[in-house]
Image (cartoon, coloured by chain):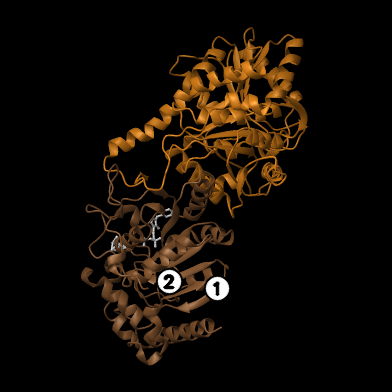
Amino acid sequence: MPLTIRDLPKEKYVLPGNAACPGCPEAMGLRYVGMALGSKAILVIPAGCTSIIQGLMPGSGLSFPIVNVAFSSADAVASGVAVAKELIAEESVVVVWAGDGATADIGFATLSGAAERNDNIIHICVDNEAYMNTGIQRSSLTPLGAWTTTTWRGKTEPKKNMPLIMISHGVPYVATASVAYPMDFIEKLRKAASIKGFKYIHLHAPCPVGWRFDPSETVEIARLAIETGMWVLMEAENGKIRISPPSKPYIDKNRRKPLKEYLERQGRFRDVSNELIKELEKEVDEYWELLIRLSSQ
Amino acid sequence: MVRLTLTGNHCVAYAVKLSKVKVVSAYPITPQTTIVEKISELVDLGDADIKMIRVESEHSALAAVYGAATAGVRAFTATSSHGLLYMHEMVWWVAQARVPLVMAVVTRTIGPPWNIWTDHHDIMDQRDTGWLIMMAENNQEVLDETIKLFKITEDPEVYLPGIVGLDAFILSHTVEPVEIPEQELVDSFLPERRQPYVIKSGEALIMGNVPSDLLTNSRMRWDIHLGLRRAEKVIDRVDMEWGKLTGRRYGGLTECYKCEDADYLFVGIGAWVGDMRLAADRLRAVGMRFGVLKIRYVRPFPYLRVLDSVRGKKGVLVFDRSVSAGSAGPLFLDLVSHMYPHRLNIPIKNVVAGLAGYEVNYEDFFRIGESFVKEVSETGWVSEFLEFYPGR
Ligand SMILES: Cc1ncc(C[n+]2csc(CCOP(=O)(O)OP(=O)(O)O)c2C)c(N)n1
Ligand code: SF4
């Protein structure tokens, strides 16, 4: 039975007065985390936009228990919290809520360590494809060709493939998600919470500020990423990869929208050449071929 | 009570077990490694009920025990030298979060070149972080103070993390006979864990979001200083309590050896204080009345106690096993900066020695003491306030 809006709790975890920019994908994602995990969640949050989104102490715009932590330390802190909660038999779901920088760059070794130990936590990488909190600098998850304040002529390297890297760790659960598909994300979060061990969910999170689009278009841009095949929703339980329903139609290459439709809506790709678009298209096609091969095994 | 012959590192491990620590996380580095190895052995043999988190770095080691401690359980880590520097960001974080926990630091030289012998640059580099920092002189003290630090750091007057320091190899890998207290004794001494707050599911408590009011934040910062000042009384009180139970009192913040009637004082921290005692005795035998002021706690720096001890002396020799490059030895700097406002004006000299593990023993202290007395009695002052001991 697919999840419907009526099944979701009414309790709010993202409150008025939070400090997110208009159209912020991280605030959306946090709302869904609240709907999925409710009062069981304990969030561990490294430096990033959500450090700010929480609002000012002693008040708060988020209604979770939160441990704010140093940029590269989140998964290790979460491991400690999870172990302690297990020892004192307090029911909880320990969640790392980390940006692409905290996940794939400075926190990468910490993440990899916790995954290899199969510690009982959920790591959510909220991927807005740059260091937004410090003013839109490139990360290893910034896509090829994208403008940032440290790549004025566009990034010259492709995006690192974190989901596959995490699957290679042999953890029980890896999934991708998108802020445009909340039901899919919530179902994945709930599944992750029901599995003991290390869980990784990579949430695609288009940021109006850093990607240069109107704040009213966050969901549209996120959806276009799926419809063009640029971002693929899938999950891997014990390494077995399955394409998730919202992305299934795009297994068929002909049903994917032209990549240009996704790129031209974002100021960060304004100066991308036709050759680079071809290169990006090739990247998308090759990734799909790989995923189709892996998921049919 | 059992008597065993143990290395300093194994003393730490037994103390952790006796303190009923719930979570240990650490990363291997010489000469700390045998602490976690021993704890792992105690756990694997079923002798200790501790959950080990075998992390991939020291930054994560302190992060993991911080997570466990903030979630409500007693936690411990240990490191040395490069490991301590690698976790430095977390050292600050834990203190500012006011989370009590204990860390053993086996002091070791910082590279390059790679060098595993003791000096104090690693531990002295942590002075500003808000941690309690103590240095032990022998293995019994290592064991006792590790247990006591849990009580001190978890005292509501303090609520700050603490470091027990021990010199590489001189203590960490050298066996001495030690008394291991009974579990019941430690249980009666150490109360259930107390901490200022616990992160729990279902309670929307947030630790560490952006402050709305910088004056409050400023006061929080200053209270770390005040917490350390308040810790002075707690350290002395806990020393007395432990002394009543075990017969072993260390003097709390400082320990004085033949200070009362001394004309001259050696001042130092850590294992080489033992050599200073021996040198003081030899110097007394040839008519130079020396005493030794062992500073047990570098943080909080017990300046009132220290000033009381040096007041009225003819001269004071402060030994540092590290140097704040471009200034002087850190222990000396702490001492003299408190002397001036307290109008204490006596001949004082800083000798920086034993860097990079270069051995200094009682004969060296004897020689340095002898020439210091000569200079002070001939000129009434010291010509060079800072000297590097050139060795023999
Ligand atoms: C050790 C360290 N280096 C640098 C910073 C500065 N810093 C804070 S947040 C941030 C970028 C965060 O980027 P990301 O993880 O992608 O999260 P986002 O802000 O996009 O949500 C940086 C570089 C820091 N806090 N700590
Ligand atoms: S910069 Fe982007 S991710 Fe950060 S708060 Fe603003 S909209 Fe959200």
Provide residue B95's location: percent of width, then percent of height. 46, 38
Residue B321, percent across and down? 63, 33
Left or right, B256 with reference to B367: left
Residue B317, horizontal then vertical, whole percent: 62, 21
Q: Which residue is mark 2?
A: A176
Of helix, strand and loop, which one carries label 2? strand
Circle 1: residue type: Gly
Question: Mark 2 or mark 1, which has the lower sequence index?
Answer: 2
The answer to which image quadrant residue A119 occupies is bottom right
**Residue ID at (51%, 33%):** B193
Q: Is mark 2 within 8 Å of ligand 1?
A: no
Which label sits on residue A239? 1
Give the farthest residue toward the top: B261
Amino acid type, label 2: Thr
Q: Colour of chain B?
A: orange
Quadrant of the displayed image that contains ligand 2: bottom left
Q: Does the CB distance between marks 2 and 1 fall below 8 Å?
A: no
- Residue pushed farthest front? A1
The hue of chain A in the figure is brown
